[in-house]
Amino acid sequence: MNSWDKFMENFALIIKEQRIQRKLSQEEFAKLSGFHRSYIADLERGARAITLKTAWKLARSVDLDLSKIIAEAELRSKNQFGKD
């Protein structure tokens, strides 16, 4: 697994954790963020690569700063796997 894959895996996990913490179903989160439920499911499984715009919309839909999600995903990736 390369650095990008590690980062994206952690990014998706953070998004899922935030959704669950807010007690939102995938359907509810999809409506808030403007995406289809199956797209959210694919993102959470890491089956889709996302654009910066998509990441921004997801973060905004749960009142988070995208920069904080990115920083946390990067930190987790480094702590779990070290540098590539």
Image (tube, grey):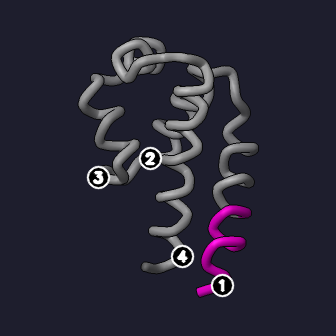
Q: How many numbered marks appear?
A: 4
Residue extending furthest toward the bottom: 84
* Distance between mark 4 and mark 3 Cα atoms: 16 Å
User: Which residue is rendered at x = 61% and y = 78% of the image?
Assistant: 81
Q: Position of residue 21 (x, y in %)?
A: 61, 25
* Distance between mark 2 and mark 4 Cα atoms: 17 Å
Kindly identify which numbered label has been placed on residue 65.
Answer: none
User: Which residue is rendered at x = 71% and y = 71% of the image?
Assistant: 79
Q: Position of residue 75 (x, y in %)?
A: 73, 63
Q: Position of residue 62 (x, y in %)?
A: 61, 21
Kindly identify which numbered label has been placed on residue 3.
Answer: 4
Q: Amino acid at mark 1?
A: Lys
Give the number of the mark in front: 2 or 3.
3
Q: Is residue 12 above or below residue 20?
A: below
Q: Is residue 22 above or below residue 59?
A: above
Question: Element under label 2?
Answer: loop
Label 4 close to label 1 by CB (< 8 Å): yes
- Part of the protein shown in magenta: 75-84
Q: Which of pointers 4 and 1 lies earlier in the amino acid sequence? A: 4
Give the number of the mark in front: 2 or 4.
4
Q: Amino acid at mark 4?
A: Ser
* Distance between mark 4 and mark 1 Cα atoms: 7 Å
For disc 1, the neighbor class at 10 Å (few under 14, some 14 to 19, many from 20) is few
Q: Which of pointers 3 and 1 lies earlier in the amino acid sequence? A: 3
Kindly identify which numbered label has been placed on residue 47.
Answer: 3
Residue identifier under label 1 = 83
